[in-house]
Image: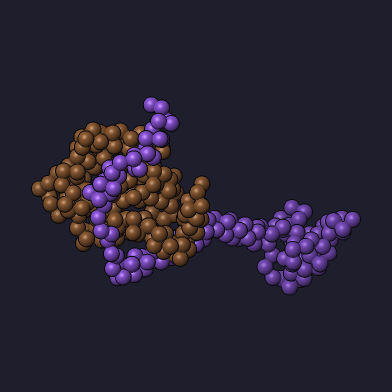
Amino acid sequence: MSPEEDDEARLVARANAGDAGALAALYRAHRGWVAALALRFTGNQADALDVLQETFLYLFRRLPLALTTSLRGFLYPVVKHQSISVVRRRRPEVAVDDASLPWHGAADAGDFTRLVAALPAEQREVVRLRFGLDLSLDEIAAALGVPLGTVKSRLHNALKTLRSQIA
Amino acid sequence: MNLFAVSRASVSVEHDDDLAPRLREALGGPALAIPPETDAFLEDAARMAARRLSARRRRRVLLAAIPAAAAAALALFLTLRAPRDARDVNGDGRIDILDAFALARAIERGGALRPEWDFNGDHAIDRADVDLCAHRAVELRR
């Protein structure tokens, strides 16, 4: 367990014992990441803030936490599904699901965004988390609940495809 | 797939060409500024959630204690309600010669006599029962 994970495990244990300070510290440690992820998924600041709130209110309701992975691993699917709900509410005419949830990066990314969007869903997700949110491979593995080797191979294949297409 | 090759590829890809910076540029974007009121709201929610959790834990401890307390109360009740030994005439919890004196006084006063004080079973409560009571008390003391 890394020092960060050790710290997080200790904070989670304290939060599970009813320590409000530990729970607030967990919020402060992860709010930026959750907000950035929600903004990429929703493309809208107000919606991203809604997702941020819903995600942490869900986390607080789930106390005591029985985590089988890091907190990011727990939060990632929550943010994703809250974002899908928000996008569906905002644009009910557009069918959005787990695989077709858009990613809002740079406005002028053009063809590059299209190339990434054309990748298989599992590879696309890894590329987005790695380069869109600057997550480490370990963090991506925790967020997706897959082994580190799987993250590496998905990233490798995705980049190989992208290279071949832009060559 | 060769894991070493995968690992080398995934590490090298971010250094050996301009793909990684271009991906960062395309997929990244501005950070979301979280308004102070959102922070305040969620930190309040965290405090309330922690308080609710503590209250739930206290309730659970109390609920767990209820069966034990009920069992103790029942045991006390049964102890207090246990039928008194018929030989304990004066009700002091001991069977001794004082019970014989108490029975004699009750007979002399003509007060209420309990059927179980008919120790010799002759359907009358009288001096014979007092004698038997005294005799048994002395026997017990041995």
Q: Is residue B128 above or below residue B20?
A: below
Q: List the single residue furthest toward the bottom.
A: B109
Q: Quadrant of residue B68?
A: bottom right
Q: Quadrant of residue B2?
A: top left
Please name the residue shown 71% across and 71% down the image: B110
Chain rendered brown: A
Q: Is residue B37 above or below residue A137?
A: below
Estimate the x, y position of residue B11 in percent, counting from the top left.
39, 40
Q: How is the image coloured?
A: by chain
Estimate the x, y position of residue A118 in percent, counting from the top left.
19, 37
The one of B10 and A104 positioned closer to us in this rendering: B10
Q: Would residue B120 appear left or right of B77 to someone viewing this image?
A: right
Q: Quadrant of the C terminus of chain A?
A: top left
Q: Quadrant of residue B140?
A: bottom right
Please name the residue shown 27% across and 61% down the image: B32
The one of B101 and A144 positioned closer to us in this rendering: A144
Chain rendered purple: B
The one of A19 and B60 positioned closer to us in this rendering: A19
